[in-house]
Amino acid sequence: MWVVAVIGVLSIVVTTLVGLYVIKWSVSRENDSNKGYDADQSPFTVSVQSEQSEPSEWAMVLDRVLTDDEARKMTSLKGSSSEVFSYLKSLGGRPLAYAAPLDHAPKRYLEEQISSERTELSDTFKMTVLTTRQYAVIINDWEVTDLTCRESTAQTVVALPPQGGVTYDGIRLHLPPRADEPVLTDDAEGQGEPYFGRRFIEVGNGQSSGGLRAEVIAPRGQSCQWGVKVHYNDPHVPGGRWMQLKDDKGEPLRIRSESVPVDPQQKWVFGAVPWTPCHEKPEEAMCLGV
């Protein structure tokens, strides 16, 4: 009787141990399968969209001159700048934002800003990073690729000059990039320092999206196209790798950034003073910084 009882207990113990081993093996196999599936997925996809909202200070460029009727209508809009902004966009205008001075940036960066002949304008976009990965993917560097620039086709500039700089969280980049760019633009510690020197973009690990707001400053009078390659790390590539960003058609992503033309046929300025046709009155003080 005692022997039977011992055999019964041993049988239960063995069955339990075998069951635990099978569960552990099954879980391990499932984890390996999940990791394999995760590794087969694209680490991330990136989309780039021009900023649609009205900047606090802006310049609008058009590839043609305004007709007399259009100019009369524009200068009759004496309400908020949003009316002018919306009207010019309806005519095909492309907005640029005045780049605010980075007052807390390192001295070397401020000296480069001061050396500029005029106030800089940026072509601003938002970059969104998406992933279906289960495990974390960290983007920790990027480089501009395949930069090509040509003379701007814009013939008209309408400007709302800055009344005081406003900074936005994000990054700033000149074309071609200056040393250490892109730099951080946040109005906080680290402004003007290399963005990827102290920050990174992380997706996956429960976070399906991330992104940046980017201010891109093209050479004056130029319209540029360029691509980006980014460096990322994940559990499947511990050492990291570089990847050229592609668009939704699988082609290398091309970003368009421009500045104001050097010698436009029409140049209008408004804001704290009445409308000023700078193409007729280039000596006006309001016209000198555009």
Image: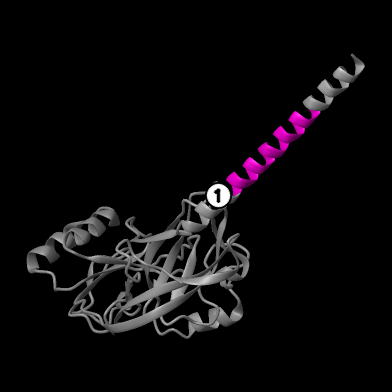
Secondary structure, mark 1, is helix
The residue closer to the viewer here, 207 or 75, is 207
The residue closer to the viewer here, 126 or 208, is 208
Q: Main secondary structure of the magenta part?
A: helix
Q: Looking at the rendering, in which quadrant would you find the C terminus?
A: bottom left
Q: How many marks?
A: 1
Q: Looking at the picture, how far across and down is residue 253, in whole percent?
A: 35, 69
Up-down relation of residue 111 to residue 239 (above or below): below
- Horizontal arrangement in the rendering, residue 152 relative to residue 13 (left or right): left
- Horizontal arrangement in the rendering, residue 41 relative to residue 240 (left or right): left
Asked whether 24 falls inside the magenta stretch, the response is yes
Q: Looking at the picture, how far across and down is residue 242, in whole percent?
A: 50, 72
Q: From which residue to which does the magenta span run?
A: 13-31
Up-down relation of residue 236 to residue 114 (above or below): above
At 60% from the left edge and 80% from the top edge, which residue is drawn? 107
At 49% from the left edge and 67% from the top edge, which residue is drawn? 171
At 17% from the left edge and 80% from the top edge, which residue is drawn? 265
Q: Looking at the picture, how far across and down is residue 217, in whole percent?
A: 40, 75
At 58% from the left edge and 61% from the top edge, which residue is drawn? 236
Q: Is residue 175 visible?
A: yes
Neighbour tally class for label 1: few under 14, some 14-19, many 20 plus, Cα within 10 Å: few
Q: Looking at the picture, how far across and down is residue 231, in whole percent?
A: 53, 70
**Amino acid at the residue labelled 1:** Ser
Q: Is residue 102 visible?
A: no
Asked whether 174 falls inside the magenta stretch, the response is no
Up-down relation of residue 86 to residue 151 (above or below): above
In this figure, which residue is indicated by the disc labeled 1? 33
The residue closer to the viewer here, 48 or 166, is 48
The residue closer to the viewer here, 120 or 38, is 38
- Residue 65 falls in image quadrant: bottom left
